[in-house]
Image: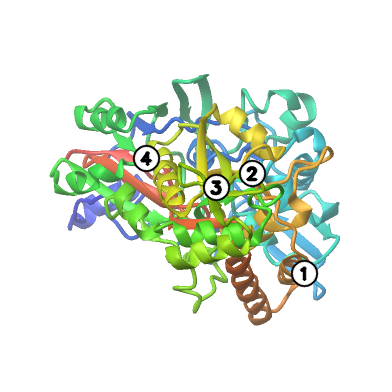
Amino acid sequence: MLPRLKPLLATALIASLLAACGSSPEGGAPATKYGGRLVLGENSDEPACLDPHQLSTTNTTVVDRPIFDSLLYQDKDGALKPWLAESWDISDDGLTYTFKLRQGVKFHDGSIWNAEGLKANLEHMRDPATKSPLAAAYIAPYKDSEVVDEHTLKVRLSSPYSAFLNVLAQSYLAMISPKQLKENPGSTCEHPIGSGPFVFEKWTKGQSITYRKNPDYAWAPPGQHAGAAYLDGLEIRFLAEDATRYNALLSGEVNVIDNTPPSNVEDVKANPDLTFSTIDRPGHPFSIWLNTGRAPFQDQKVRQALTLAVDRQAIVNSVSFGQWKLATGFVTPSTPDYAVGLEGKIAYDPAKAGQLLDEAGWTAKDKDGIRTKDGKRLTAVALDSGVNPQNTQILVQAQAAAAKAGIEIKIESVTPQVSSDRSARGDFDLSVGIWTTNTADVLWIQYSAENITTDKRRGQNTTRLSDDQLDKLLEQARASTDDTERAGLYTQAQARLIDLAPAIPLYNRPSLVSAQNKVQGLTWDHAYGAVTFHDTWVGTP
């Protein structure tokens, strides 16, 4: 639960009346008000498409979770529980999953949730025509499925996949109307149809997305109230400037803001009219990605040198005003199979950085202090989409640190689409980003050679790293059916990545959510660390 809630009223009569309205998810006070409309202010990382299987932006879950439900639900303790799947069985060899599906679920277009619907969604995720940047990678081991009866589907994998159930709890693998997938699959981007607590209403690109209540909703995940959402409507507004977003909250133009500017967090906490809450997102920390597929970062020593030259703690402190925690490696502590014991292995050591650059042959310097070899300057190009001002600040500070070591970083301002396209084809040297997910399998997504983009498949290995030892560890980890063995393999993989240095991990990305104190019942999607609204209502401050 995010904001403060009123105390429980004592009398049995009032309590019974309020119980009919439903109660908040984590032991808070009963909801007392239906109706109304809530406005959320988001940053400018607006999706290009609202089909969950085609999305990979940082705001995906916030934007899509109102519309879509998932097969499983992950609670605050990380446990996986039934949602659209009532139960499941796994074969001893880890290759077959049999899902018993919840009955009585309807999509917004009236179509019924059943085994054929689940099969259609799995096929849509992996269909090359979907051009899925994430869902297809998450279910890459999916082989085929068999409808046993109307509400039972047997799913077969080509190899054991330890993260399969985890990823099925994510919004990226949420369930789309099977009728829409069959009759009008081209409409999923512009007019998404799910089974969630809110129905998609309108998308004014560059401005907002609006939703209305689904009055028939009766299949909320565990811990949330039964029945339809309390709110009549929801609007998400894209407000690019941090100051604009924060001032919109202060003025009452919006009721809640996500991505609260770090510089304003303490002001929010001190404001009696506002509430604040945060949760660390699981997965890969926010990092500076290095393109290992071409010079200069094809050379491991140059990558290691840049990592040593950057004072990560100073950058994080400067940009976040103390709101972000320094990353200790390539997986965040809130992620299953995080490797304990590798803390402190990524150091700040400018002298060692200089030594490594000497060893790599960059021994001379030009009049600007930039190292040279064979008459060429040690230069790298960084892409900045400008979506988040903190990202720009990080690149500028990294640029200054690199210059002291004799590495020139040229920052190019590009649109998000250009940044995505150039990253996919390897036309860059540095970029910044984060990968949020609820499994250490994020390492396979980000660093397996199998996930380097080709003409046939768009992968997410932005760094274009290819290392046989790492690939073997990651393949073994995702195939392991033993928890202890899997954790050990992921620990080895995380240690290997620190040595390979394909990225510079900076901080564990939190969701920073601020709200008017009359907004009650905000909750988290724990599989991503994003705010959700099924239990939300608007009361009196």
Residue 335 appears at what percent x and percent y? Answer: 52, 64
Give the CA distance from mark 3 to mark 4.
Answer: 26 Å
Task: Name the residue that disc number 1 marks.
Answer: 472
Label 4 secondary element: loop
Mark 4 residue type: Asp
Looking at the rendering, in which quadrant would you find the C terminus? top left
Q: Which mark is residue 258?
A: 4
Residue 474 appears at what percent x and percent y? Answer: 71, 67
Task: Name the residue that disc number 3 marks.
Answer: 219
Query: Closer to the N terminus: mark 2 or mark 4?
Result: 4
Residue 283 appears at what percent x and percent y? Answer: 54, 58
Contact check, label 2 and label 4, Cβ < 8 Å:
no
Mark 3 residue type: Trp
Q: Residue at x 33, y 56 (%)?
A: 314
Left of 12 or right of it: where is 490?
right
Residue 401 appears at what percent x and percent y? Answer: 41, 51
Contact check, label 2 and label 3, Cβ < 8 Å:
no
Contact check, label 3 and label 4, Cβ < 8 Å:
no
Q: Nearer the viewer, mark 3 or mark 4?
A: 4
Query: Closer to the N terminus: mark 3 or mark 4?
Result: 3
Seen in the picture, residue 236 relative to 449 is either above or below; the reply is above
Mark 1 residue type: Lys
Query: Closer to the N terminus: mark 1 or mark 3?
Result: 3
Label 3 secondary element: loop
Residue 311 in sight: yes
Mark 2 residue type: Gly
Q: Residue at x 34, y 51 (%)?
A: 23
Give the CA distance from mark 2 to mark 3.
Answer: 66 Å
Contact check, label 1 and label 2, Cβ < 8 Å:
no
Task: Name the residue that disc number 2 marks.
Answer: 375
Q: Residue at x 64, y 75 (%)?
A: 492
Contact check, label 1 and label 3, Cβ < 8 Å:
no
